[in-house]
Image (cartoon, rainbow, N blue to C red):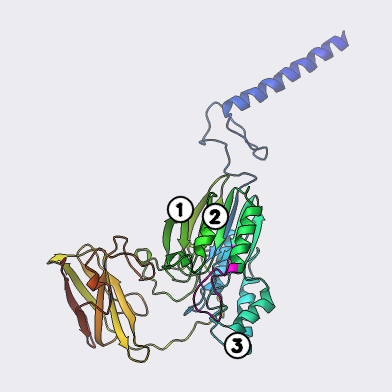
C-alpha cells in the first residue's frame, strides 16, 4: 500500500513539473537562450526574450587617420575610449605616424611613441600602412624591420579580413603592385566560402582615373561575386561610396589634421563600429566626443600635436548666386598660384546653404582666409561638399570648376569680409 501511494506521489510530481514547464514555454515561446533565467506569466513587462546574441556575431572597431597634421591628445585618448566599448579587435587604415623623414632616429622615435599608444588597447590592433608611414625607402625598410608584411589577411568566425598596401615608395603613385594583386587573387580563391570579406587600404584609389594602371580594377575583379565592404582613409573626410553593389567607406579622422566642420563636411573625429551579424555587417560611426566613462572624465595624455606654419586669417562670409538666385550646396574654394611649383594651391573653402550663404575655413572651423587676392572656383555636384578628390562632375559650367579657367576673383582684407559671387548657367 505504501509503495502504491509513493508511486502515485512521484507520478503527480512529474505531471506537475511537466505542466509547469509547458506553461512557462507557452508564456513566451520566443525565449531561446539557456543562459536567460526569468519567471514568465501570461502577461510580461518585456517585448520578447530573443536576445541579440549569436555564436557567429562579433564586433570590431576601425580607427581612421591619426596623422597628416595630427592634433594633440586625440588618438591616445581614443585608445582609452575604444577600450570602454570592448570590441574583439581594432583595425586601421594607415597614416599612423607623421613620417616623411629620412632620419632613422626620428622614424624610430615616432614608431616607439605610436606603439606605446596601441599597446594600451585591451584587444589586438592590426596595422595598415599609409603614405605617412612608408613614403620613402628608409621608412619602408623600418616598417619591414618592425612589422614585416605590408599586406596580410586573417579569418575570424568565417569572415575574411584583408589588409592591403596602397603605397609603393619611392614611387608616389598609389598602386596595388602586381605581387600584391596575385596575393589578393590567391587569398580570395582559397577563401571562397567565407560569409563576408572586409578590405582595408589607406587611399581611396578607386577614385583615380586609371584603375587598370593602379591595380584596383584587378582587385575588384577578384572580389566580384562575393559580399564585401571596403574601408579607407587618407582624405580626412567621411564619405560613403557604392561600387558594384557594395559599400566603400572613406573614414574621417581619429586625430589627423581636420577643420572639424561637422557632418555636413564629413569632418569629425570618430571610429567605425562594425557589428558582424549572421549574413551582413552593421556599421555605425561613433564620434569620439560621445564616448565617455561613468565619471565623464577621460584620462589626460602627453601626446603632442604636429607643428605647422600658419598665417593670420580673417573672417570671410559670402553669398553665391546663379543667374541672380541663391545657389545652395555648392563648394566655393579660394586658390593661389605658386610660382615655384607652377601649380594652383587650394587655401580656403566653404559650402553654401539654402540661402546661398557660406563661411570660409582655412585651418579650423570657419576661421576665414588670409589677406590677399584669390582665384575662386565654384563646384556643385549634387552631393554636398566637394573636396576635389573624387573627380565628380560639376552641374555648373566647367569654367567655374578649375582655377585655370574660372573668371571669379576676390580680395580679402584684414578685418571682417563679406563677398558676393555670381555665376551664370551659360
Q: Which residue is mark 2?
A: 223
Residue that mark 3 sits on: 106
Q: Residue at x 44, y 71 (%)?
A: 236
Estimate the x, y position of residue 373 in percent, counting from the top left: 24, 86
In this orientation, which residue lies closer to the viewer: 288 or 56?
56
Q: Which residue sits furthest bottom? A: 340
Residue carrying label 1: 244
Pointer 2 or 1: first along the chain: 2
Q: CB of mark 2 within 8 Å of CB of mark 1?
A: yes
* In-front residue for pair 191/410: 191
In contact (CB < 8 Å): disc 1 and disc 3: no
Would residue 45 appear left or right of 363 to someone viewing this image? right
How far is mark 1 from mark 3, CA to CA?
A: 42 Å
Q: Can residue 272 be seen by looking at this rendering?
A: no
Left/right of residue 14 with respect to residue 107 in the rendered view: right
- In the rendered image, residue 77, in percent from the top left (x then y), is placed at 55, 71
- Quadrant position of the N terminus in the picture: top right
**Which dot, 1 or 3, sits closer to the camera?**
1
Question: Magenta-highlighted stretch: main secondary structure?
Answer: loop
Tell me which segment is drawn in magenta: 163-178
Amino acid at each position: 500500500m505504501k509503495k502504491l501511494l509513493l508511486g502515485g506521489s512521484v507520478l503527480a510530481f512529474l505531471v506537475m513539473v511537466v505542466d509547469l514547464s509547458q506553461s512557462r514555454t507557452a508564456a513566451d515561446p520566443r525565449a531561446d537562450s539557456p543562459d536567460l533565467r526569468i519567471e514568465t506569466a501570461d502577461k510580461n513587462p518585456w517585448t520578447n526574450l530573443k536576445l541579440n546574441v549569436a555564436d557567429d556575431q562579433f564586433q570590431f572597431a576601425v580607427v581612421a587617420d591619426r596623422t597628416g597634421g595630427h592634433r594633440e591628445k586625440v588618438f591616445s585618448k581614443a585608445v582609452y575610449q575604444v577600450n570602454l566599448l570592448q570590441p574583439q579587435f581594432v583595425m586601421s587604415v594607415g597614416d599612423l605616424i607623421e613620417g616623411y623623414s629620412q632620419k632613422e632616429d626620428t622614424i624610430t622615435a615616432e614608431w616607439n611613441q605610436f606603439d606605446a599608444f596601441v599597446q594600451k588597447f585591451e584587444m589586438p590592433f592590426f596595422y595598415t600602412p599609409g603614405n605617412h608611414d612608408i613614403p620613402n625607402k628608409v621608412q619602408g625598410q623600418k616598417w619591414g624591420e618592425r612589422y614585416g608584411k605590408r599586406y596580410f589577411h586573417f579569418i575570424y568566425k568565417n569572415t575574411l579580413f584583408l589588409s592591403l598596401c596602397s603605397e609603393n615608395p619611392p614611387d608616389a603613385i598609389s598602386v596595388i603592385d602586381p605581387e600584391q594583386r596575385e596575393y589578393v587573387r590567391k587569398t580570395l580563391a582559397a577563401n571562397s566560402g567565407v560569409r563576408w570579406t572586409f578590405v582595408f587600404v589607406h587611399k581611396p584609389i578607386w577614385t583615380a582615373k586609371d584603375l587598370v594602371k593602379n591595380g584596383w580594377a584587378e582587385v575588384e575583379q577578384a572580389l566580384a561575386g562575393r559580399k564585401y565592404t571596403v574601408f579607407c582613409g587618407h582624405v580626412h573626410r567621411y564619405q560613403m561610396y557604392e561600387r558594384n553593389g557594395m559599400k566603400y567607406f572613406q573614414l574621417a579622422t581619429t586625430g589627423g589634421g581636420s577643420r572639424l566642420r561637422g557632418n555636413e563636411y564629413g569632418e569629425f573625429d570618430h571610429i567605425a563600429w562594425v557589428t558582424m551579424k549572421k549574413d551582413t555587417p552593421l556599421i555605425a560611426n561613433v564620434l569620439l566626443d560621445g564616448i565617455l566613462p561613468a565619471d565623464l572624465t577621460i584620462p589626460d595624455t602627453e601626446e603632442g600635436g604636429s607643428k605647422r606654419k600658419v598665417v593670420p586669417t580673417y573672417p570671410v562670409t559670402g553669398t553665391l548666386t546663379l543667374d541672380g538666385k541663391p545657389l545652395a550646396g555648392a563648394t566655393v574654394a579660394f586658390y593661389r598660384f605658386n610660382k615655384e611649383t607652377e601649380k594652383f594651391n587650394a587655401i580656403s573653402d566653404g559650402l553654401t546653404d539654402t540661402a546661398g550663404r557660406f563661411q570660409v575655413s582655412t585651418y579650423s572651423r570657419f576661421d576665414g582666409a588670409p589677406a590677399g587676392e584669390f582665384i575662386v572656383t565654384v563646384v556643385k555636384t549634387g552631393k554636398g561638399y566637394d573636396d576635389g578628390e573624387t573627380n565628380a562632375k560639376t552641374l555648373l559650367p566647367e569654367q567655374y570648376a578649375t582655377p585655370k579657367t574660372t573668371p571669379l576673383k576676390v580680395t580679402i582684407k584684414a578685418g571682417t569680409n563679406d563677398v558676393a559671387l555670381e555665376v551664370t548657367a551659360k
